Amino acid sequence: MAHPILVPQVGQDLTEAKIVELHVKLGDRVKKGDLVAVVESEKASFEVEAFAEGVVISLPFKVDDWAPVLEPLMMLGAEDEVATAAAPVTAGAPVATAVAPAVAPVAVPVAAATAVPSVAAMASPAPVVGGLRASPAARVAAAKQGLDVSRIAGTGPAGAVVLRDIAAAPALVRISGEVTLRTLQSGQGTPVIFIHGFGADLSAWRPLVGRINLGLPMMALDLPGHGGSTGQAAASLDDIVASVGDALRSVTGGVHLVGHSVGAAVAMALTARGDLDVRSMSLLSPAGLGPTVDGAFVHGFLEAQTEAALAAWMRRLVHDPAMLAPVLVRATLSARADAGLVPAQRHIAHALFEGGTQLFSTAAALRAFGGPSTVIVGREDAILSAAEIAAATPPQAALHRLPGVGHLPQVEAADLVVTLMCRTIRAAG
Amino acid sequence: MRELMYRDALREALDEEMARDPTVFIIGEGIAERGGSYKVTEGLLAKYGPGRVRDTPIAEAGMIGVGVGAAIAGARPVVEILYVDFAMLGMDMIVNQAAKFRLMTGGEGRVPFIMRTQGGTGGGVAAQHSQSLEALFYHIPGLRVVMPSTPADAKGLLKHALRQDDPVMFLEHKHLYMTKGMVPDGEHIVEFGKGDIKRAGSDVTVIAWSNMVPRTLVVAEDLAAEGISVEVIDPRTLVPLDRAMILNSVAKTRRCVIVQEANRRGGVASDISSIIMEEGFWHLDAPVEIVAGLDIPIPFNLALEQASVPQKPGIKAAIRRALHLEPAALAAE
């Protein structure tokens, strides 16, 4: 009797995991507790152990393959056994290498939140073996909220997504037009919206959000042309702000904004739109407050083809190179498996940073903002100018200049950033 | 309000309507001198005389034929058939005559014929005296199918039956005659097509009728102790069926269990389930569960009889499955 070893559920909202290590090959005998594989998702890797003794009689994956979670990673059986049991499952999942990196949720435009779910709106963007198991009520609720039901972990029979999963899901994909909005942490009250910087995506916020204990909903979005958000149309900061503003229209009753770099500029510009009730702003290494930008970095970062090249450029983001985790580089690289991503980002880079100059300014918006605002900048920022940012920060905003920190204070001074951010949010009352 | 037994509530309805309408009369086996096997008609002979309360020979085809004919001629006959199983002898009169007459006369004819009878299991009376045959009548267009579960409903529905003009299959349950319940004082009428929420709840809708209602209510009480809020809906009349009440409840709870004593195949529960599939599908958070009798003749042996129809543990398990608290029997993929 063959037994499967399943690919672990590596994240609540993920359907695939990348296999980074395989410690067994076909015909190997394993015993209970043996490490057979390591799979990875976003920033975490998971060791897979054998739960029983047996011989590996089926192993359909190789290193770097993406495997659907909760499906057999391999089959264990007797020496002479043929892995027929594995066939029906794995046959349905010919997992091509890097078809859809787990870090890049696929945005599917959902028709306006109509009560009647269309077949198109129900179509699952991710391959789900054996069909998507979700109750009608869950599908309707997901469609109404613009949620991608295929990315929700089900708790119903055989993992079916049922209504309670929609109501209580802590990590959901919310899709609005071109911008993916995802709840990273559920909570009650005014949501905190995290906006990443150029070339990153919403998953970059996960380590930081994991340290926050405010009880508020924590949501993050992918800027157009980044992560799971589609669209190359962004020809200016205004285009990006318009898309994000539209996506946030579904969030009613006020928001706290946390932005990094270009994301901070987007946050500032959002307050000037007037249709979003922004309660507070926490701006990390904000763009839009001066002309300087490291044009060589933008170009080199975008065009790097290998892990080594990308790491070389990304080290410029931090003051202490040790702070740049290799997994962050790999995640950035694997996100580029989406063929549309780099061209879209080139387009945006051209629109925002042509000639090594920030072609937009959000200083006026920051000056006009009446709520609590905090600017956090690393004194050793090599991408933007800390001096320019400090000079443009108006008197009513709190300014924190962190020594020994580069362009990523949320990585290099995470605890302090969390403290300052929470203080800013609480100050809004 | 007074507490009455189901059988006494039925007698009150007959008594009141016979006093009100001289065209109402009753015939049946042992219903006059003996007052009926379940004592529903006790005392009516003395009050209304042998012209309106009449014993018949053991000849169900003849009794039903008399009733249908008298109804067409303008009377309001109530024909008591001792067991619904015996109504099969009169099926031609019911299905081909009573059910069709109004339509085939272009709406000029009326058949206010009431067949009072009882069904269901109870105490080992075996395969020919234990059936729940409502689905046979439910299937025939033109018949009204009434299945009261409480004394109040029994009285109110029987009174309404005697004031409308279509043939009514009034199906009582042998286990319910001695049950007690509060009955409103004065004129109490329950119109057809209006279900009753026997217990309000929010987690799961259970639809049950006849003797399955009290059984389900016991289960609902048990589950309340576990924090599960069960809404119990009794349609009271299967034809016409209160679709709105069912669909509204399912829209609220998003889960539905249907309990019928009759065997599963071709049953009313399956039809109600299909209605929910068509009209309430997008509300559902779980497959509709049906708890029904086995597709076998009811066994004589008491233990086997019990095993052949829904009991409390089976109802409870179905409710828990609908709430995803127990693994569902998933079809292989």
Image (cartoon, coloured by chain):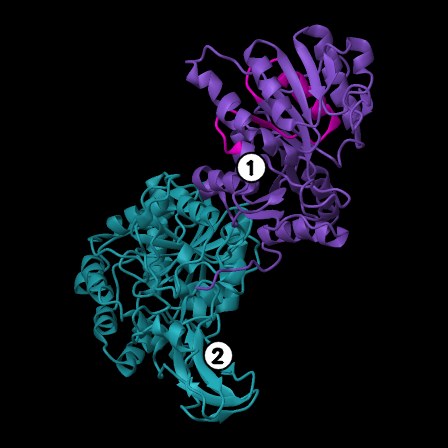
Chain colours: A cyan, B purple
In the rendered image, residue B319, in percent from the top left (x then y), is placed at: 63, 49
- The amino acid beneath tag 1 is Ala
Q: Chain of mark 2?
A: A
Nearest to the observer: residue A191 or residue A181:
A181
Nearest to the observer: residue B246 or residue A59:
B246
Q: CA distance from mark 2 to mark 1?
A: 47 Å
Nearest to the observer: residue A125 or residue A297:
A125
Q: Quadrant of residue B55?
A: top right
Q: Which residue is mark 1?
A: B135
Nearest to the observer: residue A91 or residue B36:
B36
State which region is magenta: B138-167
- The amino acid beneath tag 2 is Pro
In the rendered image, residue B241, in percent from the top left (x then y), is placed at: 54, 29
| Residue drawn at (25%, 72%) of the image | A301
**Mark 2 Cα-neighbour bin, 10 Å: few <14, some 14–19, many ≥20:** many
- Tell me the number on the disc at residue A4: 2
